[in-house]
Amino acid sequence: MPRLLRANYDQYKKRIETSSLPSVFQDAITMTRRLEIGYLWVDCLCIIQDDELDWDTESSRMGQVYSGAFCNFGACAAADSVLASFGDKTHVIGDVGLFVERDSQALYLPAVPVVRKDHRKLYYAYTNLMHPKLALSSLMKRGWILQERLMSTRSIYFANQLGWECGELVTCETFPNGMPAVPVTAPWGNVTTPFKINNLLERSALHSSQSSNADERTEMEKKWLCVAERFQSCRLTFENDRLPALSGLAQCFHRVLHDEYLAGIWKNDLYRSLLWYRSDPQVNLHIPSDLYPVPTWSWASAQGSIRFPLAHQHCLKFDEEQQAFTLLETTLSGLTRDPFGRVKKGAIRIAGHMRKGSERRTDTRTEASEKRKYNDWYDGASSNGDTFHLLLGYSRCIVESSRGPLRVLRGLIVSPAKSPSQAYRRVGMFMHPWPPGESDMDIFHEFVDFNLADPQVTITLV
């Protein structure tokens, strides 16, 4: 793969032999010329790869590059290693069968639920849709591509069939007038709604003109967490790209939220954003701090898929969440001039209720664990020391138990850090019943005698 380096910078400024480039680059040049566009951006040829200053400067501008471009090319076939170019249509959709002229957007795909024992799945009558295949392609599993797809005004995807997407429509050769409706929703609308930043920022998940500004803000903050979840399921070649790869998107959300950005978290949404867990704790979650100095309380310190439970909580069995801690101070030091990029260190000082805990683990990958109402989720295979349960908030269950009102407590599992004193690092999160029932008394014992009027302690999370 050719790369722009300091050693070949002067040479590349004069000329790059097209024949020396991979087929996918040559195809991109051909398409650009046919569209009569004068410039083509290729990351590895437009950013000096061995110049850290140039990389930091240009990576902070990638959002502008994507949003300002006329069109974005996605070589899904090449990314899947099926072909070395944009795509060779080995699978051609022939005119076989009965065809009816009909607006595809008015077509609702019939679906049949199949249930057998514990198996339940929804099968659609026609599955050759571009959207799900695009999401599953290797290209869309790359971390940098998420921002690229969201921020580009229009995209063309080269896979087993041609697909294209803009702010209004996502379609393909099979359905050139738009995808049929699918009864699945997403944070930006229906699952067939184009996955573009304007649909995230402008479309309220409440779908109501009566919603208040506070409601709109909450929905916007939840959308950011959904973006973070999707990003965490992608791969990065270099872990220290985790924050830079979302810098452009963070800048867009900042223009709407007008909030302080703390290593992937919005300050006004700290409670909901601190509560995340990973589905596979058997693999060490946190990246070594000497390689990637992101504070442990940030989801950006994690490797692998994560989930923010409060970003998806639409259950009517719980009242509104109540925050049970006070934020006293935040400190964050960046490695570059980009306030949305890499960080050197970060800490938050809070006052809250903390109890000595005991370590208990369950395999969160099992179906039974997914159905558990209460749990302790650990970030890695071992916490390496004493652990404490730090309460962040609670909600009251509308359906009362025989013991009276039941609350659900939520918070972080923390462990003393090596330095500084009174500093703790995050090692997990918890969700406990309060007061616990007789069957839960021994399991969730940390807050058995807890009272909200109890004095709080002040700690620093690093």
Image: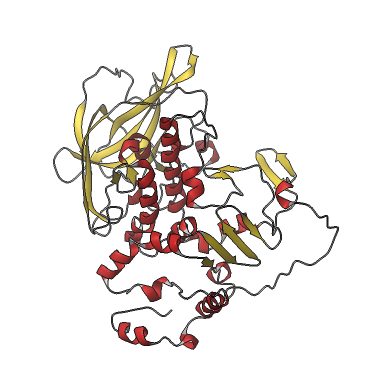
Q: Quadrant of the C terminus?
A: top left
Residue 403 position in % (x across, y down)? 44, 12
Residue 145 position in % (x across, y down)? 46, 61
Q: Residue at x 35, y 55 (%)?
A: 247
Q: Nearer the viewer, residue 238 or 6?
A: 6
Query: Vertically, is 409 above or below 184?
Result: above
Q: Quadrant of the N terminus?
A: bottom left
Residue 45 position in % (x across, y down)? 39, 76
Q: Nearer the viewer, residue 261 or 348?
A: 261
Is residue 335 rendered to the left or right of residue 421? right
Q: Is residue 302 visible?
A: no
Count the marks: 0
Residue 51 position in % (x across, y down)? 27, 73
Query: Vertically, is 119 above or below 135?
Result: above
Query: Vertically, is 162 above or below 320?
Result: below
Q: Residue at x 71, y 39 (%)?
A: 115
Which of the 4 image quadrants contains residue 120?
top right
Which of the 4 image quadrants contains residue 338?
bottom left
Is residue 440 rendered to the left or right of residue 268? right
Q: Is residue 320 visible?
A: yes
Q: Residue furthest left?
A: 421
